[in-house]
Image (spheres, rainbow, N blue to C red):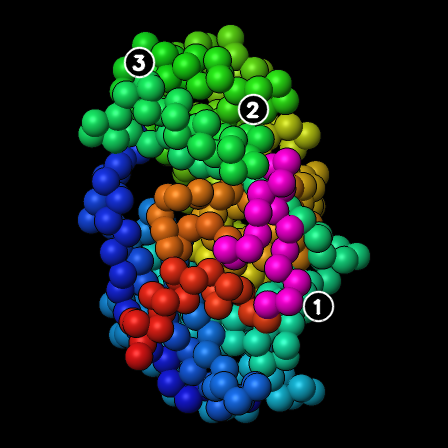
């Protein structure tokens, strides 16, 4: 199996809302296509990759550093010698040639995009859904999950948003089959955010839960003020109250806040996760970690993160990736994670799952008959990648 070409494009998200930190109206996404010499059912195998929302397109790093190394590598270096199939784990090492330790962030995103596309191509070439290909390669659990718990992430700040429109949005997620939902905080006053929280809690049926997300906005005093107020509610979790690398503040919060804390979506390497586990005071029996494989060098790095966490008393079930798309859903199923974020009707066409995957009682079943990530089963996303690379 040989890579014949890699193409790079950018696509806008263009969403007219914000969280507590950023405005998404000018956010972009990198999309790549890895073309191969393998033909299945008369079609050339092409693997597709893209980055999760919240990180801009990585065109410069991809075209100037990451992809030239991949193109320059001898074909036999990139394949498993036993099968002749591309090995994304080896490819990651090639892409990281001459890169210094540290400085993760955007570089981790760029490599993660390629990793996604390579795994899509490998799974298609071998006729397997991605979650099965990942399970077979890493073997972290006895068998992949047939369905994954998902929650509906929304509740952003809209220029013309009202409490009524927020409640209507949440009702629409419940109508889709979600049981648990998340809204943003930190983009308004504490009093206004509490009004939003109470307004949503008032319409949630029994058994449904609400999480809140500050996107790392708060300093420690503000985070503690919110924690004190949020303690009055039985929330699913209080997410990213402080800067993701401010481990000391997280440790203080973990001492003061009795409910669950969640963080990790802006940690991009195993070294950062190790430091979080060492120094952030988080509670392995209670708190939630949200590292995003597609932003963090890909599946192999994520597997290393899980190994690091396991050594410090964490279970994979405490991990629930950010991202809300097909790739992270497959990782969650393959690695035995506790769940996966979902973006119903948000960040389309990248967010969300295969069109014929209904949410049932807060869970989504995996599409067993689609090889690869499943982009071909998501009509709007499949149409976009075909237009970008025709």
Query: Residue 40, relative to residue 166: is it above or below?
Result: below
**Residue 209 has which mark?**
2
Classed neighbour count for the residue bearing mark 1: other residues with Cα under 10 Å, few (<14), some (14–19), many (≥20): some
Name which of mark 2 and mark 1 comes first in the sequence.
1
Relative to 336, 193 lies left or right: left
Specify the quadrant of the image occupied by residue 72.
Answer: bottom left
Q: Earlier in the sequence, mark 3 or mark 2?
A: 3
Residue on which disc 3 sits: 192
Q: Residue at x 20, y 29 (%)?
A: 159
Mark whose residue sits in front, 2 or 1 = 2
Residue 138 seen in this snapshot: no
Q: Nearer the viewer, residue 199 or 251?
A: 199
Q: Quadrant of residue 103?
A: bottom left
Instruction: Tell whether position 100 is magenta.
Output: no
Measuring 36% from the left and 67% from the top, which residue is drawn there?
383
Residue 356 shown in magenta: yes
Secondary structure under tag 1 reads helix
Q: Looking at the image, is 243 positioned above or below residue 203?
A: below
Return the disc, 3 or 1, that comes first in the chain's sequence. 1
Circles 3 and 1, Cβ within 8 Å, touching? The answer is: no
Q: Identify the mark at residue 136; answer none if there is no mark.
A: 1
In this view, the mark in front (3 or 1): 3
Task: Kindly report the distance in space between the C-alpha atoms of the residues bearing marks 3 and 1.
Answer: 48 Å
């Amino acid at each position: 199996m040989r890579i014949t070409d890699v193409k790079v494009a950018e696509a806008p998200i263009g969403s007219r809302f914000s969280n507590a930190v950023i405005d998404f109206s000018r956010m972009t996404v990198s999309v790549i296509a890895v073309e191969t010499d393998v033909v299945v059912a008369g079609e050339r195998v092409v693997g597709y990759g893209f980055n999760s929302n919240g990180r801009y397109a990585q065109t410069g790093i991809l075209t100037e550093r990451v992809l030239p190394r991949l193109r320059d590598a001898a074909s036999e270096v990139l394949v498993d010698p036993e099968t002749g199939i591309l090995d994304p784990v080896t490819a990651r090492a090639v892409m990281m040639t001459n890169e210094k330790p540290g400085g993760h962030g955007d570089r981790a995103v760029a490599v993660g995009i390629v990793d996604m596309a390579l795994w899509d191509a490998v799974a298609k070439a071998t006729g397997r859904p991605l979650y099965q290909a990942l399970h077979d390669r890493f073997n972290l659990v006895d068998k992949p999950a047939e369905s994954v718990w998902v929650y509906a992430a929304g509740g952003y700040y809209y220029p013309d948003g009202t409490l009524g429109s927020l409640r209507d949005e949440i009702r629409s997620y419940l109508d889709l089959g979600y049981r648990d939902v998340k809204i943003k905080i930190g983009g308004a006053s504490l009093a206004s955010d509490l009004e939003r929280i109470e307004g949503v809690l008032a319409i949630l049926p029994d058994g449904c839960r609400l999480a809140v997300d500050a996107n790392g906005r708060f300093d420690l005093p503000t985070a503690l003020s919110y924690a004190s107020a949020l303690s009055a509610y039985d929330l699913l979790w209080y997410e990213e109250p402080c800067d993701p690398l401010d481990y000391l503040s997280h440790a203080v919060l973990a001492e003061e806040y009795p409910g669950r804390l969640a963080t990790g979506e802006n940690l991009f390497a195993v070294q950062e996760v190790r430091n979080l586990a060492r120094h952030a005071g988080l509670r392995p029996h209670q708190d939630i970690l949200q590292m995003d494989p597609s932003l963090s060098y890909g599946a192999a790095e994520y597997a290393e993160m899980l190994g690091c966490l396991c050594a410090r008393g964490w279970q994979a079930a405490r991990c629930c990736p950010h991202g809300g798309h097909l790739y992270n859903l497959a990782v969650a199923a393959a690695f035995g994670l506790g769940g996966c974020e979902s973006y119903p009707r948000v960040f389309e066409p990248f967010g969300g799952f295969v069109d014929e995957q209904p949410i049932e009682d807060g869970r989504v079943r995996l599409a067993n008959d689609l090889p690869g990530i499943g982009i071909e089963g998501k009509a709007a996303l499949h149409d976009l990648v075909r237009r970008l690379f025709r």
